[in-house]
Image: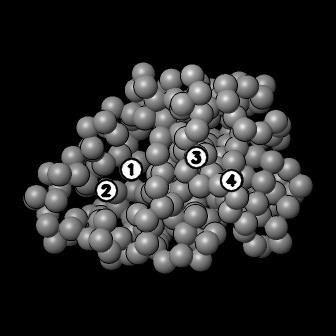
Amino acid sequence: MTKIFLIRHGETEWNKLGKIQGNSDVNLSPEGLRQAQLLAKHVPFGNVDAVYSSDLKRASDTAKILAARFNLPVIEKPGLRETNFGDWEGEPISKLLEDFPDDFGNFFIKPDKVNPPNGETFLECQARVENALDELIAEHENQSIIVVSHGAAIRLLLCAALDVRIRKMWSISQFNTALNILVADEGNFRVELVNSTAHLYLG
């Protein structure tokens, strides 16, 4: 059995501007740093055995703040990256909806049909992040780990854990520094918590 504390990174300036981030390496905003510090201060668990993150700065910097709480290093794992949105990255969602109503129009309505130019589909991302998480589970039998990743990537992992279709992925909220708790046991998942941001209100 492996307990996974699956966490979305803190806020970035692109989050505030409604821009598509994907594999673009965007820094945390001051608010994002504050969110990560609040989570580290109020983590609702006692001990972890390892801390992993995507190798993108917004995730790894969030993970470093959490890891310091437990005196652990952060191990970066590229397989935990956000979906690669290709040519759409850096563009505001509102502009993409206006300029590419057919191609981008399915982003929130039929995400299983989305195929970003020079990027990857959500199905491809789901397979990648599932493989990365499976590797961590195999390495940490009977342990607890922190895994810091990204909004869409985490939704896709939760869809897989709950056996929910990708088309319903946006039905799962994932706010910045949201905490999700999964337990992996002999190939099966139990989801114990989704999208908790209680730490942001504790000061």
Give the alpha-carbon distance from disc 2 to disc 4, as whole Å.
30 Å
Q: Which mark is residue 196?
A: 3
Instruction: From the image, state whether disc 4 or disc 3 is nearer to you.
Output: 3
Task: Say left or right for 115 vs 7.
Answer: left
The residue type indicated by label 2 comes to: Gly
Give the alpha-carbon distance from disc 4 to disc 3, as whole Å.
9 Å
78 or 59: nearer the viewer: 59
Earlier in the chain: of badge 2 and badge 3, it is 2
- Dot 4 corresponds to which residue? 181
Q: Is residue 10 above or below residue 20?
A: above
Disc 2 secondary structure class:
helix
Task: Say left or right for 6 vs 178.
Answer: right
- Dot 1 corresponds to which residue? 22
Give the alpha-carbon distance from disc 3 to disc 1, as whole Å.
23 Å
Earlier in the chain: of badge 2 and badge 1, it is 1
Category of crowding for the residue at label 2, using alpha-carbon neighbours closer than 10 angstroms: few (below 14), some (14–19), many (at least 20): some
Category of crowding for the residue at label 4, using alpha-carbon neighbours closer than 10 angstroms: few (below 14), some (14–19), many (at least 20): some
Res 119 → quadrant: bottom left
Instruction: From the image, state whether disc 2 or disc 3 is nearer to you.
Output: 3
